[in-house]
Image: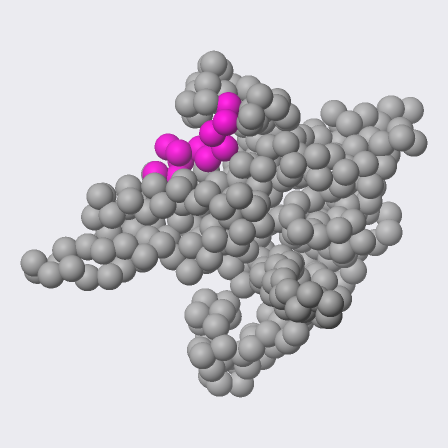
Amino acid sequence: MTRITENSIEEFAIELLDKLGYEYIYAPNIAPDGETPERETYEQVLLIDRLQNAVKRINKSIPADAQDEALKEIQRIASPELLANNESFHRLLTEGIPVSKRVDGDDRGDRVWLIDFKNPYNNDFVVANQFTVVENNNNKRPDVILFVNGIPLVVIELKNAADENATIHSAFKQIETYKSIIPGLFMYNGFVVISDGLEAKAGSISAGFSRFMAWKSADGKAEASHLVSQLETLILGMLNKETLIDLIRHFIVFEKSKREDPETGIITITTVKKLAAYHQYYAVNRAVESTLRASGFNSPPLEGWQTKSDGVVNSPPLEGW
């Protein structure tokens, strides 16, 4: 009988992502001192050359100087709070980065996009393992990171199910450690995946363990068999290129709540980042498709309905996050 190891789970995940069209990179090869470096320092978590190439490809009508300024802006985000940084970046990622360009002698406003949301396959998808990050003299190496156009959007932490001390909860605790020690990696994070090879759950960087959820369908039509590992179902159903891009654009919200201390009268604002569950994701998309069919549209369902003012479909409250 083949012994299950953390490495074998990692290899299994990478093989599945490779089949989905991700380019595999062994991260030490692109380290500052690697064979083909793509990072200037171990503190740098963006793959800048890939991001620059993607921005140039996606924003052909934007002058090079405006593209460069947009890239500088996402690297200047510097709140002392990780979640505030993450929210600021997410807004720029999903709404575009405002820039100014000269047109016929006049300054005109425009936006630079870091991801091609209209065509998911026009983006650069990379799965990298053993990506070392050094921050404030702390050295950590998450198991697997998914980059889209050089942006580390998904961090995957894997544990060995055969080791009774290495549970999916220990994978969650490892992510919590990373967030406190190398927060720079998570400024650009879309969501996190934790797994012990059998169980697999996804959640946002503000979610407690109880809020991490399994992705139970690979195609949105039926729940996966219990004979299939949750990790395989999650990768195929959630991390395929179209679904990942759609989730990042339309199914992440930052919810704010206000609380007043009855004794001091001091008001505190709390922010929670929420990621849609699989049943919410598929239900909303089916509703959009149904509405478009009824309206006589044959265009792809997801472009252009992300705001309430669009008048197409408003997603239902995402309860239970």
Q: Quadrant of the N terminus?
A: top right
Say if 135 sits above or below 297 in the image.
Answer: above
Does the rendering let one see residue 251?
Answer: no
**Residue 49 on the magenta span:** yes
Specify whether 227 is left or right of 36.
Answer: right
Q: Which residues are magenta?
A: 42-52
Q: Position of residue 275 (x, y in %)?
A: 65, 58
Q: Residue at x 67, y 51 (%)?
A: 206
Q: Residue at x 82, y 44 (%)?
A: 199
Q: Residue furthest front?
A: 264
* Residue 268 in view, yes or no: yes
- Residue 88 rendering spot, x and y as whole percentages: 47, 53
Q: Is residue 149 left or right of residue 63?
A: right
Q: Quadrant of residue 276?
A: bottom right
Looking at the image, is 255 positioned above or below residue 41?
below
**Residue located at (61% from left, 28% from top):** 129
217 lies above or below 146: below
Who's the residue at 71% across and 52% down the image?
A: 207
Residue 263 drawn at (x, y percent): 73, 67
